[in-house]
Image: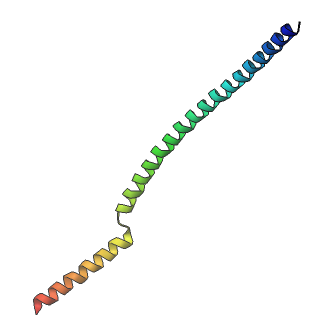
């Protein structure tokens, strides 16, 4: 009788382990899904950041109105210096 009781107790423990293993597998599967979704979102964010960086570089490469005025003044100064040198 004791032997049968031990067998029954071991079977119950195995059933409990199976239930716990099933829960563990579910949690691991959920973790994989969430990680996959996170990786996809991170990839999309990286692509968006590249586009933003490209746009910022394009904007920064275009001189502002103030910079254009400074360039013009400097060219006028250089032109006047060259003209003055040629007059000498």
Q: How many marks?
A: 0
Q: In the depicted view, which residue is nearer to us: 39 or 81? A: 39
Q: In the depicted view, which residue is nearer to us: 3 or 27? A: 3
Q: In the depicted view, which residue is nearer to us: 1 or 44? A: 1
Q: Give the position of the N terminus as an image quadrant.
A: top right
Q: Position of residue 64 (x, y in %)?
A: 38, 67
Q: In the displayed structure, would residue 67 be above or below residue 38? A: below
Q: In the displayed structure, would residue 50 be above or below residue 32? A: below
Which residue sits at x=16%, y=89%? 84
**Residue 10 placement: quadrant:** top right
**Residue 5 placement: quadrant:** top right
Q: Furthest residue to the right?
A: 1
Q: Give the position of the C terminus as an image quadrant.
A: bottom left
Q: Image check: 35 left or right of 56? A: right
**Residue 29 placement: quadrant:** top right
Q: Image check: 71 left or right of 48? A: left
Q: Furthest residue to the bottom?
A: 88
Which residue sits at x=11%, y=91%? 87
Q: Position of residue 55 (x, y in %)?
A: 41, 53
Q: In the displayed structure, would residue 14 be above or below residue 51? A: above
Q: In the displayed structure, would residue 26 be above or below residue 11? A: below
Which residue sits at x=68%, y=29%? 27
Which residue sits at x=43%, y=53%? 53
Q: Position of residue 80 (x, y in %)?
A: 20, 85
Q: Position of residue 66 (x, y in %)?
A: 38, 73
In this figure, which colouring scheme has been used for the structure?
Answer: rainbow
Q: Image check: 83 left or right of 2? A: left
């Amino acid at each position: 009788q004791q032997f049968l009781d031990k067998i029954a107790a071991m079977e119950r423990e195995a059933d409990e382990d199976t239930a716990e293993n099933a829960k563990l597998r579910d949690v691991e599967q959920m973790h994989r899904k969430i990680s996959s979704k996170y990786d996809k979102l991170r990839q999309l964010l990286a692509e968006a950041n590249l586009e933003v960086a490209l746009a910022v570089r394009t904007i920064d490469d275009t001189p502002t109105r103030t910079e254009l005025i400074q360039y013009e003044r400097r060219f006028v100064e250089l032109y006047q210096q060259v003209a003055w040198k040629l007059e000498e």
